[in-house]
Amino acid sequence: MDATFLCDNSIIENYLATDKEVAHFFRNVGKYVPFDIEECYLWKLFKDVNEYHRNIWHVRWAGFRFKYFDTAWSFLSALAAVILVLFTAVQAFFAVYAYARPPLSCGSEKH
């Protein structure tokens, strides 16, 4: 329960009888307070955050980064893998190029 966690970590002090009463208090503390989001000074921030999260690619990229690149070592190992793949592709290109267009030897020129 959240109220228990807050009390155990000395974030709030429980002067009510139980943690359920604390949870009930916080659940109902702003129940009848009128709130217009467009009059709030954080309205632009709320709007920007909602627009950012509506784009599914931002959410997926964040999930990908959190899942696969949570440490510096995982990022460095992925970077090393990408560099190795690039070097392998360059090596394969030059191997095929040398086979398709062999270099001219000095003695085989025609006059």
Image: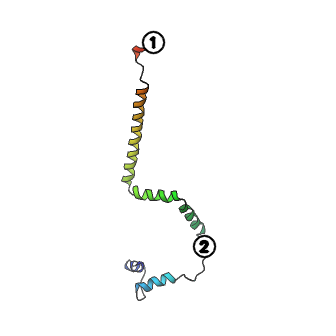
Front-lying residue, 5 or 105: 105
Residue 107 as seen in the image, left or right of residue 54:
left
Residue 37's mark? 2
- Nearer to us: label 2 or label 1: 1
Q: Residue at x 55, y 64 (%)?
A: 49
Amino acid type at image mark 1: Lys
Neighbor class of circle 1 (other Cα within 10 Å; few <14, some 14-19, many 20+) is: few
Q: Residue furthest top?
A: 111
Q: Residue at x 40, y 34 (%)?
A: 92
Compare marks 2 and 1 and give the one earlier in the sequence.
Answer: 2
Q: Position of residue 32 (x, y in %)?
A: 57, 83
Amino acid type at image mark 2: Ile
Seen in the picture, residue 28 relative to 87 is either above or below; the reply is below
What quarter of the picture does the N terminus occupy? bottom left
Q: Residue at x 63, y 73 (%)?
A: 39
Q: Position of residue 20 (x, y in %)?
A: 42, 84
Seen in the picture, residue 110 relative to 86 is either above or below; the reply is above
Q: Position of residue 18 (x, y in %)?
A: 40, 87
User: On the image, which quarter does residue 31 sit in?
Assistant: bottom right
Seen in the picture, residue 45 relative to 74 is either above or below; the reply is below
Residue 80's mark? none
Q: CA distance from mark 2 to mark 1?
A: 84 Å
Q: Secondary structure at mark 2?
A: helix
Front-lying residue, 2 or 96: 96
One can see residue 69 in this view: no
Q: Residue at x 40, y 55 (%)?
A: 68
Read off the residue under disc 1.
110
Q: Secondary structure at mark 1?
A: loop
- Label total for image: 2
Q: Position of residue 80 (x, y in %)?
A: 38, 46
Q: Residue furthest right?
A: 39
